Image: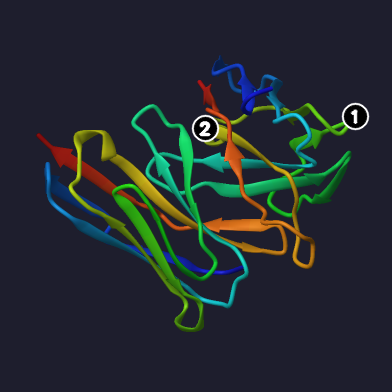
Amino acid sequence: GAGVSQTPSNKVTEKGKYVELRCDPISGHTALYWYRQSLGQGPEFLIYFQGTGAADDSGLPNDRFFAVRPEGSVSTLKIQRTERGDSAVYLCASSLTSGRGLSGANVLTFGAGSRLTVL
Amino acid sequence: GIQVEQSPPDLILQEGANSTLRCNFSDSVNNLQWFHQNPWGQLINLFYIPSGTKQNGRLSATTVATERYSLLYISSSQTTDSGVYFCAVEDFNKFYFGSGTKLNVKP
């Protein structure tokens, strides 16, 4: 698509429920990132995909968080047993390339985000 | 990870004024980007600027990589410039963001 698309834009759920957030990157972008942004703070890294594989998931806060990208395009961030502290805006970004030593710059394009509220 | 500090945290300007936003980072980087987050939350990439100077209209940016800082200049500010400006640096595919500078341009 023309830009990075994220759905839903808003999700309100109850504590303990399961949530899925979807990201559709720019067509042809091989790198995909998930970030989380709390009020008044900068985005914090969660996970990075290069193609289908999670190249770095060191930012996932605990094992309730999981993300997949089975065909190397659309990605889904899954949160189990949601807690009130999970409330935040979840941002997805994609880029054409990644990593040091590869040609081209790793320039991020962000989606509009999914605002998650856990009651 | 790399520490990114931005200053000032808040800035109020009268329309037409100029401003300079600063980003300091704790380690050498090959990738630095400036973003503008509009009041609706959308992050827009302004500059990819690991070193040197770039200009785009009323905005320009300079990164002095050897001294680990970058500056974003906004000239003749407009109300549409309001929002939060973030600096982000990359370290092995992980981008580290500062806490941002919140800019409010008053008419």
Q: How far from the left and from the top, in percent, is residue A51?
A: 86, 41
Q: How far from the left and from the top, in percent, is residue A90?
A: 58, 33
Question: Which residue appears at 57% of the width and 69% of the height?
Answer: B2
Chain ID for label 1? A
Question: From the viewer's perspective, is B73 left or right of A65?
Answer: left
Which sits in the foreground, A67 or A100? A100
Q: Secondary structure at mark 1?
A: loop
Question: Which residue appears at 50% of the width and 41% of the height?
Answer: A37
Residue A78 is drawn in which quadrant? top right
- Give the mark nearest the N terminus, 1 or 2: 1
In the picture, the quarter occupied by the N terminus of chain A is: top right
Q: Which residue, given by chain and number where applicable, does mark 1 sit on?
A: A71
Mark 2 Cα within 10 Å, few/some/many (few <14, many 20+)?
many
Gap between marks 1 and 2 measured at Cα: 25 Å
Question: Which residue appears at 45% of the width and 82% of the height?
Answer: B67
Question: From the viewer's perspective, is B99 left or right of A8?
Answer: left
Residue A31 visible somewhere in the drawing: yes
Question: From the viewer's perspective, is B88 left or right of B36?
Answer: right
Is B22 located above or below residue B80 in the figure?
Answer: below
Question: Which residue appears at 15% of the width and 48% of the height?
Answer: B12
Q: Which residue, given by chain and number where applicable, does mark 2 sit on?
A: A89
Q: How far from the left and from the top, in percent, is residue B57?
A: 33, 47
Q: Amino acid at mark 2?
A: Val
Closer to viewer: mark 1 or mark 2: 1
Mark 1 Cα within 10 Å, few/some/many (few <14, many 20+)?
few
- The colour scheme applied to this rendered structure is rainbow
Chain ID for label 2? A
Which sits in the foreground, B14 or B3? B14
Label placed on residue B104: none
Q: Amino acid at mark 1?
A: Glu
